[in-house]
Amino acid sequence: MLTGLVTMRRKLVVGNWKMYGRLVKNQALLQGVSEGVRQLNGADYAVCVPYPYLAQAQSMLQGGNVAWGAQNLSPFEEGAYTGEVASGMLVDFACSYVIIGHSERRGLYHESNETVAQKFAAAQKSGLTPILCVGETLSERESAVTEAVVATQLDAVLDHFGAAALSRAVIAYEPVWAIGTGKTASPEQAQAVHAFIRQRVAKHDAKVAEGLCILYGGSVKAANAAELFGMPDIDGGLIGGASLVAEDFVAICRAAQ
Ligand code: PGA
């Protein structure tokens, strides 16, 4: 049981730009986000940009209250891995976060739970905060195996590294059927899975579970953010499409106040 432990979790809103952006467009977007979020202080904010734009994000966001990060990394420190990017390289650009195991990487690039766990460890070893994505497909939900799928994805990290590793990580629950589809999980549907995740971690360590930041991702918009973020186990959002429009992203950040 988690009752009796009173931890006020701070909310977090993270933009996931995916493979969108160009130098000139980013400039306006980063400026709009940085200015729009400047007066907000009730939550934490970040954007995860494509690798080539990390330097731009760093130069435009440093000194403000929006952190930045990447969307993937290599599990290896260095070596002959053409096209890969190591965690130390992300540290060179002062990244705070890195998204790990996004469903697009699991699905399109066949990343296994094992690989995801290795990447999680590589991120933490370099001092980056991994944002570990979990979530079921539509057919998995329809077959009523959502909890089993999420448990397997979570256990890949929990069993390897223990609950203590999650005290320096963020979880993002992203039902695959809600990503980029305009079809958001209802606050109740999301809350149920968030509570399940927290309880599963609590079986290992109740204190870590209570402090764990669990984001919801999947068609979060300014219009539905407040309701989702109002649920007891939803600690913010991982925002795709809406993070590409400064005023939409800022409105979502405001909803996390
Ligand atoms: P979406 O993407 O907000 O565009 O649905 C979320 C994500 O994939 O992180």
Image (cartoon, helix red, strand yellow):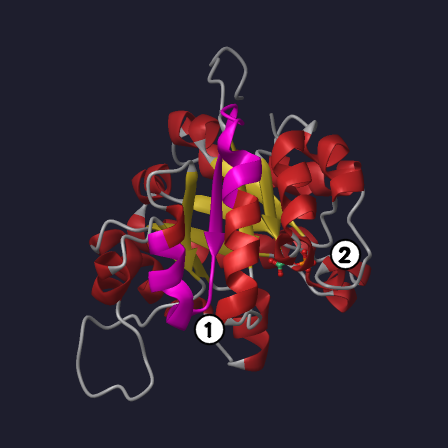
Q: Mark 2 points at which residue?
A: 144
Give left or right: position of 138 versus 203.
Answer: right
Indicate whether residue 144 is drawn in magenta: no
**Label 1 is placed on what type of residue?**
Ser
Ligand 1 quarter of the rendering: bottom right
Left or right of 133? Residue 231 is right
User: What is the quadrant of the N terminus in the image?
Assistant: top right
Q: Quadrant of the C terminus?
A: top right
Q: Residue at x 75, y 63 (%)?
A: 177
Three-letter amino acid code of the residue under disc 2: Ala
Q: Can residue 117 be seen in this view?
A: no
Q: What stretch is highlighted in magenta?
A: 34-59
Could you classify mark 2 by the number of other residues whose Cα lies within 10 Å: few (under 14), some (14-19), or many (20 or more)? few
Q: Is residue 232 above or below residue 53?
A: above
Label 2 vs 1, first from the N-terminus: 1
Instruction: Look at the numbered disc 2 and give the secondary structure of its residue.
Output: loop
Q: Which of marks 2 and 1 is in front?
A: 1
